[in-house]
Image (tube, helix red, strand yellow):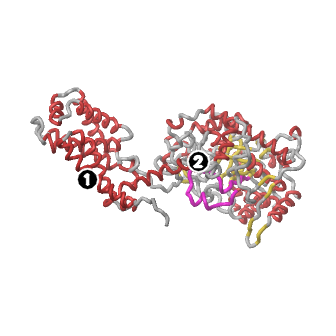
């Protein structure tokens, strides 16, 4: 910070295609946040099973909405890490409590989860150097 | 016998490296049996475990992180906060570089129009290694001091000779190195104070021209704004620029104190579309000017180029250089005599001069510092009998009235400062000029950072700074027993002795030599 050394390696800008996973993750997060915050019966059922109804559902819904916003902001890498964290939590839920077929969805929930997890990890990985504090060491 | 309270960092970090995954596991199990909410803890701990595994086993570029894991991050955190912590908490008032708090505070006070009298005594060391001004036992009454006047170009009888009414000018800062607001605040301040401003090598000086102050157009080695595609001079464009009413002089930059022998440098972070257009350069790359003008490959061709610029522009034309080898300077002066072509001024940039971006080795280890260079150049001009053919300007950390008077005594007819005016604009010396992140909006193009730089308010500070300096110069001239600036000479300077070649020049020897030279020559200024 603050050094006047022009020899510092310059970061190349993120490739344009990275917008694809970024928008997929942001779109899905915004959609599931909307479902949770509008008392969608499927989500009510899931959170009842997790023992977190209704406060946990609202909390997770707000976090997911926040993730969607950060993902489309200039701080996308931070949003991507947050999103990965939320997906990791969801994965734990499916692995320990919910099972991989929820409400007879044929694995749709878990499939979506995997899609968002892969997308957000991709964004976080490609732009890891922009992360605060740890970016320079990655 | 010493009792050690040292913390064994290795043990602490090993404990952390083990406990993070263990706590993650405990939290996972507890989350399953007690409440799912605990997984809000499990997830970050799992991610932290992953990061830590990468630090310990996955990466090889950071030894500390590989040996100690995530706790070693603390070092990077503190290191990144270091400059600010030192500046705010730990550095004493005279410790910081390039400008310590005492020097900065003086400019701030002048710019804000606050009395800069201080109490109890000087904060500086008096070790006999510094240049000092020598006052007279017989001060001159202030009413008898004559106003400053210097006409550049009078030697050639130019119709467009330029008269300076103050011995101070705003030194070269381009639009590019500075943001638009900063350039306009400086230009408006220059207009208010009645001093000229140098445009720096930034191409067509669009923002400088907005405030209609007097301008010195600087032509760098890349000749932004007046170049042909091959980097040589485009006579037509120069003539057109010189026709702008505000442009009063042209300065050919041969070298710069902060990076002598190297061309200008504008990091790509700071290149906006507008700058790319004004300079005629591509976006997305650092812009590195060549180290020399293609036209100037030896003394004769350099002098021929000066003549060409003089003829094309019709304005006073100066050259700016940082002194390197004395012998090369003499060769250049002799080439001037041989062709009977003289620049209207030479501006000597000291090695301590500032820059928006330069390689560290050039900043630290190249070139002659100003107060050493200036008497040498002045002496060579006198020895070659051409001191009356041109004016001599000086630049390089001349932010305080005392330093400016030292330069004026050691041969300069007028002085430049750039950073003095940046401080007047509110520069806090964050040292981020190359990163487009200037926190006070001076050396950045980001609108959200430039927002805080109010053009009208800051332009008043620029003018205040000049007026406060004028007041101090007048008081100092009186104390030095001089009625006019042109009477200043090495006689009123205490010079530290220094070694030259095998002989150690005593302070007296060298000073006497300079004084004798001066006595036998006519100073150009009336």
Region rendered in magenta:
B346-369
Residue B476 counted in the magenta span: no
Residue at horizontal 29 percent and vertical 38 percent from the top: A23
Instruction: Identify the residue at the far right of this view.
Output: B138
Provide the residue designation for mark 1.
B22
Q: Can you tell which mark lies on residue B224?
A: 2
Side (left or right) of B2 relative to B218 = left
Residue B348 counted in the magenta span: yes
| Residue B245 visible, this orientation | no
Residue at horizontal 34 percent and vertical 57 percent from the top: B55
Identify which residue, B11 or A69, lies in the foreground.
B11
Identify which residue, B22 or B518, lies in the foreground.
B22
Q: Position of residue B124 (x, y in %)?
A: 70, 52
Identify which residue, B255 or B156, lies in the foreground.
B255
- Identify the chain of the residue marked 1, using the numbered disc in the image: B
Side (left or right) of B162 relative to B67 = right
User: SS at mark 1?
Assistant: helix
User: SS at mark 2?
Assistant: loop
Nearest-to-viewer mark from 2 and 1: 1
Residue at horizontal 24 percent and vertical 41 percent from the top: B38
Q: Position of residue B346 (x, y in %)?
A: 73, 53
- Identify the chain of the residue marked 2, using the numbered disc in the image: B
Question: Could you tell which of marks 2 and 1 lies nearer the N-terminus?
Answer: 1
């Amino acid at each position: 910070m603050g050094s006047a050394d022009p020899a510092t390696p310059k970061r190349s800008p993120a490739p344009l295609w990275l917008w694809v996973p970024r928008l997929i993750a942001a779109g899905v997060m915004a959609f599931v946040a909307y479902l949770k915050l509008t008392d969608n019966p499927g989500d009510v059922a899931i959170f009842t099973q997790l023992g977190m109804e209704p406060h946990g559902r609202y909390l997770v819904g707000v976090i997911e909405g926040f993730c969607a916003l950060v993902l489309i902001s200039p701080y996308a890498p931070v949003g991507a890490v947050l999103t990965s964290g939320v997906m990791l939590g969801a994965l734990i839920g499916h692995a320990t409590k919910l099972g991989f077929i929820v409400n007879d969805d044929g694995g749709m929930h878990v499939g979506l989860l995997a899609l968002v997890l892969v997308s957000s990890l991709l964004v976080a990985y490609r732009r890891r150097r922009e992360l605060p504090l740890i970016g320079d060491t990655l | 016998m010493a009792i050690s309270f040292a913390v064994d960092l290795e043990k602490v970090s090993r404990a952390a490296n083990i406990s993070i995954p263990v706590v993650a596991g405990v939290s996972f199990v507890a989350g399953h049996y007690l409440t799912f909410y605990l997984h809000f803890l499990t997830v970050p701990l799992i991610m932290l475990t992953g990061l830590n595994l990468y630090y310990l086993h996955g990466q090889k570029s950071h030894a500390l992180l590989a040996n100690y894991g995530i706790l070693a991050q603390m070092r990077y955190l503190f290191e990144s906060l270091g400059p600010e912590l030192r500046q705010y908490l730990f550095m004493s008032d005279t410790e910081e570089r390039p400008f310590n708090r005492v020097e900065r505070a003086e400019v701030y006070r002048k710019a804000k129009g606050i009395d800069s009298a201080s109490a109890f005594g000087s904060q500086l060391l008096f070790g006999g290694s510094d240049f000092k001004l020598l006052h007279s036992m017989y001060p001159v009454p202030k009413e008898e001091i004559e106003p400053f006047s210097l006409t550049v170009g009078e030697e050639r009888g130019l119709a467009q000779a330029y008269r300076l009414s103050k011995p101070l000018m705003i030194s070269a800062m381009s639009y590019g190195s500075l943001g638009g607001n900063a350039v306009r605040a400086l230009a408006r301040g220059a207009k208010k104070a009645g001093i000229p401003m140098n445009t720096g090598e930034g191409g067509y000086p669009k923002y400088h021209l907005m405030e209609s102050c007097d301008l010195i157009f600087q032509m760098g080695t890349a000749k932004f704004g007046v170049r042909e595609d091959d980097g040589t001079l485009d006579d037509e464009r120069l003539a057109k620029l010189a026709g702008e009413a505000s442009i009063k002089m042209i300065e050919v930059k041969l070298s710069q104190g902060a990076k002598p022998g190297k061309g200008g440098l504008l990091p790509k972070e700071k290149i906006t579309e507008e700058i790319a257009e004004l300079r005629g350069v591509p976006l997305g790359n650092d812009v590195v000017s060549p180290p020399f003008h293609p036209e100037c490959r030896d003394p004769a061709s350099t002098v021929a180029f000066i003549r060409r610029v003089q003829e094309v522009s019709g304005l006073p034309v100066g050259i700016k250089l940082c002194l390197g080898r004395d012998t090369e300077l003499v060769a250049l002066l002799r080439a001037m005599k041989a062709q009977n072509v003289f620049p209207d001024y030479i501006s000597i940039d000291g090695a301590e001069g500032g820059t928006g971006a330069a390689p560290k080795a050039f900043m630290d280890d190249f070139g002659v510092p100003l107060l050493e260079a200036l008497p040498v150049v002045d002496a060579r001009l006198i020895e070659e009998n051409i001191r009356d053919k041109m004016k001599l300007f000086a630049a390089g950390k001349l932010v305080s009235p005392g330093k400016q008077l030292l330069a004026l005594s050691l041969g300069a007819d007028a002085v430049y400062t750039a950073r003095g005016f940046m401080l007047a604009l509110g520069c806090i010396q964050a040292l981020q000029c190359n990163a487009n992140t200037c926190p006070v909006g001076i050396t950045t193009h980001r609108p959200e950072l430039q927002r805080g730089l109010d053009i009208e308010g800051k332009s008043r500070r620029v003018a205040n700074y000049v007026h406060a300096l004028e007041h101090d110069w007048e008081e100092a001239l009186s104390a030095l027993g001089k009625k006019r600036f042109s009477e200043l000479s090495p006689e009123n300077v205490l010079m530290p002795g220094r070694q030259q070649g095998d002989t150690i020049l005593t302070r007296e020897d060298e000073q006497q030599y300079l004084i004798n030279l001066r006595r036998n020559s006519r100073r150009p200024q009336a």
